[in-house]
Every structure is written in C-alpha cells, then in structure tokens.
Image (spheres, coloured by chain):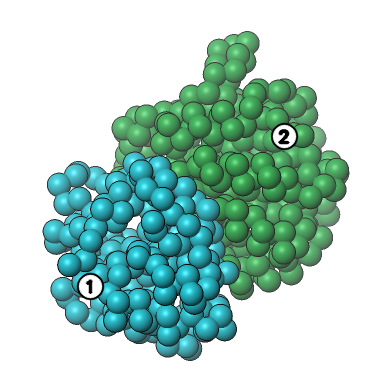
Amino acid sequence: MISVLDYGAGNIGSVIRMFERAGGEAQRISTVEEITESKKLVIPGVGAFDFGMSHLISRGLLPALNSAAIQRRIPILGICLGMQLMCRSSSEGTQPGLGWIDAESRQFKFESSSGLHVPHMGWNTIRVVRSNPIIASTVDEQRFYFVHSYRVMCNDPSDPIAFTHYGEDFVAAFQRNNLFGVQFHPEKSHRFGTDLMRRFLEFEFA
Amino acid sequence: MLKHRVIPALLLHDGGLVKTRQFKDAKYVGDPINAIRIFNDKEVDELMVLDISASKERQQPNYALIEQFAGECFMPICYGGGIRNVEQAYRIFDLGVEKVCLQTAALEDLGLITRLSEQVGSQSVMLSVDVKRNILGKPQLYAAANGKTQSIPWLEFVQKAVAAGAGEVLLNAVDRDGTMKGMDLGLIRQASEALSVPLIAVGGVGSMADIRAAVEAGASAVAAGAFFVFHGPHRAVLITYPRYDELERLLEFC
C-alpha cells in the first residue's frame, strides 16, 4: 500500500489512480500517525515552495517525515514540488526545505531571444544516466509531462538518475538510497508514468 | 520529441459533449467520459474541457463530473467554465486537474488571476480570450458568457492578464470556431509576438496542415475541437487523434 501525502498543495487523486492503473493500491493520508505507519510514501505537490513547506510545518508533519526518510528509511517518492521540497532550499522561497538531498532549486533564466518560455511546460524526453530502480534505462524516448519554473541542482553528482534538456540539462530525477524525486508528473505521463509507478510499487530498500 | 502540444478541446453543455460553430448551434456529440477514454488510449498530449453553459447560466462548475474526468485522464487536463473565485479553483485542482482556464471572471476582475497565480503558480492559470472580427475585419475582444464585444483592445487585455499572472493564453478565433476552414493566423502572429507566455491557438483547425501553420505563426500549442470529433463532409461523430509519429513528422523543424 502506497501512502500519498495530502498536505494541501496539489492534486492527490490522479496519483492514487495511476498507482491503481499500475496494479497497486494507494491511499490518501494527511496525519502524523498515518505517516508513521506508512511503508511507502509519495509527496506530490504543485505550487510555490514556501507555500508547500509552510503547509508541512503548520500541520506538524516534519518530525514524522524526517523519521520516515532518515531513521525508518522507507521508500519515498517526491513529485514536482515534492521533489524540490526534499532538497535544502529553493530560490523561490526563504524557508529551508526538508534537506534530505544535498541540492537547491533555482529558477530557469533564459534570454528572451532564446524563445524558451518559463515555466517549462509540456512533454519532454529524459536521458537516464545511471541504472536505477524506478526508470528503465533501456527504453528509447521515454517522455514525461513537465510543469515547472524551478529546477533542482544537485551538489552530489551521484544523485541524479536522469536529465532532461530545456535550454540546458537539468535533473529530471534523482535517487539517494530510499529517496526518489522526479521533476515531471508520472501520474500524467501515460504508459511511461505507469511503468515508473509499477517500478516504485515493486521497489524494496534493503 | 514534440515541442508543440496538440490538444483536443472538449466542450460541455449540461454534462454532455457538444461542438459549436462560431459559438452557436451546439451539436451533441456524445458522452464526455467515453470521449476522454478514447483520447486517453490515443495518448493525447493534453486535454482541455470547457463547460460552455456554466458561466452563461451562472452555474457552479460540475465538480462531480470534473472529478470523473480527472480520474480517467492519464495526461494533463485543463478545466474552464464557471470559475469565479479562488476557492472554486482550489476545489478543482484538488480533484486532480492541472490547470484552470478563466474568461468571464477575468473580464470582470484580473485580481482573480493574480490571487490564483500567487498561490498555485502561473503555470496552472490559463486565460481564455475570445476574439471576434467585426464587419470591417477588426479583431475585438468578445465575452462568451453574454455574447458581447468589449471596448478594451483585445491584445491590451491579454497583456494585462499576463502581467496579472496568467501563465498561458488560449486564443480562440470566434469566427473560425467549428468551421474547420483554417485558423486566424494573423491573430496568432500578433499574439505570439506580443506575449512571453505560451500561446495556445484554437478555432478553425480542419487539417494537419492547419496545425503546422499555426505553429509556424508562433503558437506554442494548438487546440482543436471539431477536427478531432467530426469526420467527413456531413460531420459524422468519430473521435480521432493523430499518432505520435505523425505529429512528430508534421511539426519537425518548426
């Protein structure tokens, strides 16, 4: 059973339904007790960084989340804003992030002559850079749906597992032990997302 | 990899799927859930569902139906129709919808766009702008809810809405709606030159070449209704969507 954290920042329903499509079960959770009982956790999210962090803080969820990530070491998947919240900080906000991953989020900056718009919104392909449990490295042109203005910059070069190109290469997905983050939306990425969700369902952290 | 989205735009009227011609003569084309399932199987880029009766009749968005749509969609979905405040928009995001599309409320007060984009990010807030040419061919801002043209110049309004926080602009050429006779490339060109946010052109797509022409005119994405739901000269209902490799070839080098 996957627990999908509802902290008031973004949609939960489509994440749950994508896990069901992938052959698993998922439930919406929101309390400290439910986090403590979780075996596998997804932190989704859309919106601004401080908005997301302040919701986690005001609901008193930080100690339970830290315990799940660092002491209990259950598999955790952050999606979009959820991925960014797992990092140290973001130039979008003033609050520190969860700090599980040594990385920061910074806004895309492009010259207007580049023709590149921010947010980066739409489908894009990824390039898998290391073998990992959640994204197949043998499938050509896997495409995922992105909607974001900030991208994660990892300080530890061993954390990224996939990159995407939008004006520059940026981290599309990272993994550190039991912790995963994806900048795209697997729940909105057709069979490519279904495959990722199925792999996350099957993943066990030894 | 496709850089430009191609989006089916579904119109709802009293819970049924319809297609209009020049914003009139709504013809019933079927069950929206069934249509969404078909578009899902065809792996469409993105889906747009616009309730054309909600604002006109000052109704609330049909939340139960929107929730069903989101559940069927394994692709991004945008909903528009009857959203008048932040709370309604939030409820819709919470049902699993990525973006909301605003027109009637935005024409009255751009503050809603600002409040929403500050809270959820501008990428989830789309402005829908309808433009109708008068008998002299001059494009004018049009309010779909009451069928009246507005005094503010259309492009000025769009720019104000973008400055207020709209992250995307859906530009609909009223005169081309449902005609399948080609898009208003002049409007698309003007808008794309003036805007820094993605522009979705809609209205008039009747062929794959029309989609390419709109992209060449500067559209970031192209939406179509009739082209994806009608087939043949008698407009028989048949839901279609080009294959990914067809779109890739079509939009190559754009």
Q: Amino acid at mark 1?
A: Arg
Residue B51 coordinates in the image, percent (x, y):
71, 41
Q: Chain of mark 1?
A: A
Q: Residue at x 56, y 29 (%)?
A: B35
Q: Is residue B166 left or right of residue B20?
A: left
Name the residue that disc number 1 marks: A176
Residue B231 coordinates in the image, percent (x, y):
55, 16
Residue B15: mark in rendering: 2
Image quarter where the N terminus of chain B lies is top left
Colour applied to chain B: green
Q: In the image shown, does A113 or B126 lie closer to the viewer?
A: B126
Badge 2 element: loop
Q: In the image shown, does A81 or B208 lie closer to the viewer?
A: A81
Contact flag, marks 1 and 2 (Cβ < 8 Å): no
Residue A47 coordinates in the image, percent (x, y):
53, 69
Label 2: how many residues lie within 10 Å, few (<14), some (14-19) or many (20+)? some
Q: Which chain is cyan?
A: A
Q: Amino acid at mark 2?
A: Gly
Q: Residue at x 30, y 70 (%)?
A: A74
